[in-house]
Amino acid sequence: MSKLLAAGKRAAAIVLALLLGACSPSGNERAAPAPPPALQAPASASGATARGVALPSFVSLVKQAGPAVVNIGAIQQGNASGLRRGDPLYEFFRRFGGVPDTGEAPTVSLGSGFIISQDGYILTNAHVIDQADEVIVKLTDKREFKAKVIGADVYTDVALIRITANGLPVVKIGDPSKVDPGEWVAAIGAPFGFENSVTVGVVSAKGRLLPNGSYVPFIQTDVAVNPGNSGGPLFSTNGEVIGINSQIYSETGGYMGIAFAIPIDIAMGIAKQLRETGKVVRGYLGVQLQELTQDIASSLGLKDANGALISAVQRGGPADKAGIKPGDVVVAFNGQAVQTTADFARLVGETKPGTTVSVDLLRGGKRETVKVTPDVLKG
């Protein structure tokens, strides 16, 4: 059976045993030469040709952006009880009796990340550092640091961590909206712990929604992404990060040619909130959404399938109070066009709770405008 998996799923114990030397935890920074300055995006270069069409070369991209990509080891200390952090019983024993610890070997989850500021802020996936007792970051110059978790947002699977260092190499942030399906892209990460591995492919689709309830408009690619690639950057050919590799669709847990990346603009917005407050606050309307197909649009008397279809409304929620009803099709939110359910969910989430905004919708073939005040999304 096919499965949608986080690309940072723990590697098998035998693989970890082989790789712990490359990701061994350390509390002290290792001496190393001064790191290179902030990176500049490399110019796209043409390499070999196929049937007269120039193929991109990723050599300069890897040389310049590679040093800003890091390995992440998330360590969970072993204990004989089998309980883990976050488990209510674990917290009970920790507070009142102590969790038994017989020296059982810790477990290590491997992942990737990339540096976004010279003073040590790093983006990765939330599932990479989930429930970790210790997070170790390893740079390409072999230095290792203990990282502090600034915050994580499970809803978008974005996490921000920081190491104590300065003058670090950084990636250049791009614009996912300027990348089209069919364009070449490259991923750099640590699949199965093999650091700074480079894989390339093309963008397969944009705005892809997955059945995980997050409504993140993922970038789908055919780039080889495997366990350990999670949290690593997805680059355009001009060396700009356009996404964070997050999930794969696979029957085996390995590469099957379908990978999904979180658009970097969404991730940077989350990182900004995490850096400022350590948490993410997003708007909430109390609606369920359904994809608007051409058949449904025709049945509703609409000319096209653009918009977000409201399939259910929570009683007493912000949308209900505003008069939004099942069957309404939202076409604009706070003055911004809504083409898909992902557009609508993103715009609602980005709205500060308590702020009153306008919602343009189609009802019975007629366009109406209502005012709605999003509440705080909890949980």
Image: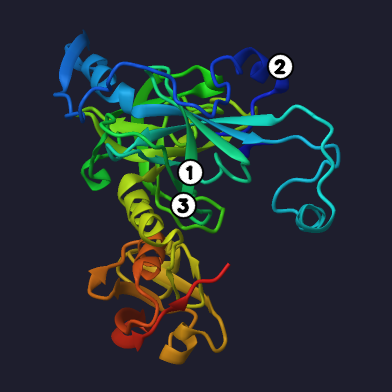
Residue pointed to by mark 1 = 148
> In which quadrant of the rendered image does the N terminus lie?
top right
Q: Amino acid at mark 3?
A: Leu
Q: Residue at x 27, y 29 (%)?
A: 169
Q: Residue at x 82, y 54 (%)?
A: 93
Mark 2 or 3 closer to N-term? 2
> In which quadrant of the rendered image does the C terminus lie?
bottom right
x then y, percent, for residue 194: 50, 17
Residue 42 visible in rendering: yes
**Image mark for residue 14:** 2
Residue 51 visible in rendering: no
| Element carrying mark 2 | helix
Mark 1 or 2 closer to N-term? 2
Residue pointed to by mark 3 = 209
x then y, percent, for residue 78: 76, 34
**Contact, CB < 8 Å: mark 2 with mark 3?**
no
| Element carrying mark 3 | loop
Q: Nearer the viewer, residue 21 or 238?
A: 21
Q: Quadrant of residue 88?
A: bottom right
Q: Nearer the viewer, residue 41 or 253?
A: 41
Whether residue 138 sits left or right of residue 1 in the image: it is: left
